[in-house]
Image: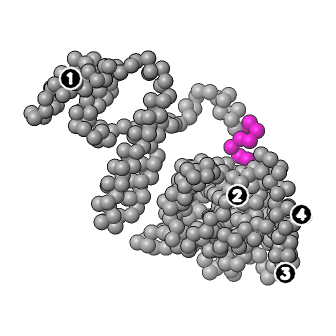
């Protein structure tokens, strides 16, 4: 975590380098004599060796009994490294700002914010076989993010997992945002903390949709039954730990980047101790993409960033995307209707399209086509019903 440049004084920087270099080479700590001998070699001609001897003397006066509080000192080192790395990133960002290299600024800040003691070197495959299978099968394990459709959950062997990216595909006006609202409600009922990011509709309008989904009031009934809506929502909340929390956040269209999304989640964690299990982004094309790229490449890059975001924050990400013009003409939307934009689903773990004819719309029906499933069956259709008065989407029987 710590770099020599983080120290304010050159004496501390050089002493730190001597200790680290010696340890890397010999896997033990150097004695005072070794430190002084090495300092003779690297100190400048204007520096006095006596200054370094005074520093060593001060260190040796340290009360060793206090080292029993190891965790305290480790936390102090971590705080020091985090603060200094952030200062370093901010200083570098000033130059990058002049160069208008905003992506590099984002990378510098992100790397600084990731400094910490939690080091995960991955799974040693041949060790702890029982342990890893226990983690997979234990209650509330990794694949416990259900969709509103049981046939899809079965095909996914129970559901989705954290660190995954899922996407719904549909032409304009067919129900992408409506599905995302239903998915958010499903996750909350299942005990997951959810952040719903709206890039098109206001927070109050999204909440109004969710009012109907949670309480089953018709949209036109909500205004005259606000008290009853509140009562029903309180009953849902009183189910205790089984019910998650939900936060809705509106951002201006084409203003939010994935880096901005990270900053928002960091604020939620720091100010409200809120860490989401599921992040819903409504929807992909409304995020700010790299204007220097063709649109289809920019969308692919954004999808890649969202996939990395899901891994970084250990959450499930849901989003939606639109088809090309051919999507309105076909009976079943497949990846062919994405044309040059196919790359945006390449990094997804689950992708399905919502398909609906005019006759199906009149009957409140539609069909899901599972375009891609990295963890289960794909290329099949699930019939669904859409209650346009209560905005509830569910799997249709038969």
> Could you tell which of marks 4 and 3 lies nearer the N-terminus?
3
Tell me what residue is drawn at x 20 percent, y 23 percent.
53
Q: Secondary structure at mark 2?
A: strand
Q: Quadrant of residue 234?
A: bottom right
The CA distance from mark 3 to mark 1 is 86 Å
Q: Nearer the viewer, residue 287 or 396?
A: 287
Q: Residue 362: which numbered mark, if any?
A: 3
Q: Quadrant of residue 389?
A: bottom right
| Residue 62 drawn at (x, y percent) | 35, 21
The CA distance from mark 4 to mark 3 is 18 Å
Q: Secondary structure at mark 3?
A: helix
State the quadrant of the N terminus. top left
The CA distance from mark 4 to mark 2 is 29 Å
Please identify, in this view, whether the residue under mark 3 or under mark 2 is nearer the observer. 2
Magenta: predominant secondary structure element? loop
Q: Which residues are magenta?
A: 137-145
Tell me what residue is drawn at x 64 percent, y 49 percent.
162
Q: Tell me if mark 4 has few (under 14), some (14-19) or many (20+) residues whose alpha carbon lies within 10 angstroms of its own.
A: few
Tell me what residue is drawn at x 34 percent, y 58 percent.
93
Q: Residue 53: which numbered mark, if any?
A: 1
Q: Is residue 285 left or right of residue 294?
A: right
> Could you tell which of marks 3 and 2 lies nearer the N-terminus?
2
> Could you tell which of marks 2 and 1 lies nearer the N-terminus?
1
């Amino acid at each position: 975590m710590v770099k020599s440049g983080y120290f304010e004084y050159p004496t501390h920087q050089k002493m730190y380098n001597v200790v680290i270099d010696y340890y890397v080479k010999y896997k033990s700590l150097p004695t005072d004599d070794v430190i002084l001998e090495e300092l003779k070699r690297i100190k400048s001609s204007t520096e006095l060796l006596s200054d370094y001897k005074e520093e060593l003397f001060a260190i040796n006066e340290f009360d060793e009994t206090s080292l029993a509080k190891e965790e305290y000192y480790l936390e102090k080192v971590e705080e020091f490294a985090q603060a200094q790395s952030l200062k370093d990133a901010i200083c570098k960002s000033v130059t990058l700002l002049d160069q208008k290299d905003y992506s590099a600024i984002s990378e510098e800040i992100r790397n600084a914010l990731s400094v910490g003691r939690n080091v995960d070197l991955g799974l040693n495959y041949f060790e702890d076989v029982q342990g890893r299978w226990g983690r997979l099968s234990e209650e509330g394990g990794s694949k416990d993010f259900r969709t509103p459709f049981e046939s899809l959950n079965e095909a996914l062997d129970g559901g989705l997992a954290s660190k995954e990216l899922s996407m719904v595909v549909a032409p304009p006006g067919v129900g992408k945002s409506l599905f995302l609202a239903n998915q958010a409600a499903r996750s909350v009922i299942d005990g997951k903390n959810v952040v719903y990011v709206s890039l098109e509709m206001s927070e109050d309008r999204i909440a109004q949709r969710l009012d109907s989904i949670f309480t089953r009031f018709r949209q036109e009934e909500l205004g005259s039954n606000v008290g009853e809506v509140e009562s029903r929502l309180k009953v849902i909340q009183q189910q205790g730990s089984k019910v998650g929390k939900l936060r809705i956040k509106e951002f201006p269209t084409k203003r939010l980047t994935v880096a901005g999304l990270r900053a928002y989640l960091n604020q939620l964690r720091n100010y409200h101790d809120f860490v989401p299990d599921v992040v819903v982004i409504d929807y992909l094309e409304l995020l700010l993409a790299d204007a220097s790229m063709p649109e289809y490449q920019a969308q692919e890059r954004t999808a890649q960033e969202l996939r990395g975001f899901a891994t970084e924050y250990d959450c499930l990400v849901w989003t939606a995307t639109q088809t090309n013009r051919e999507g309105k003409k076909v009976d079943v939307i497949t990846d062919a209707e994405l044309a040059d934009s196919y790359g945006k689903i390449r990094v997804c773990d689950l992708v399905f399209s919502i398909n609906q004819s005019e006759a199906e719309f009149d009957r409140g029906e539609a069909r899901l086509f599972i375009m891609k499933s990295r963890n289960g069956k794909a290329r099949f259709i699930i019939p669904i019903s859409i209650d346009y008065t209560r905005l509830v989407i569910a799997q249709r029987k038969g």
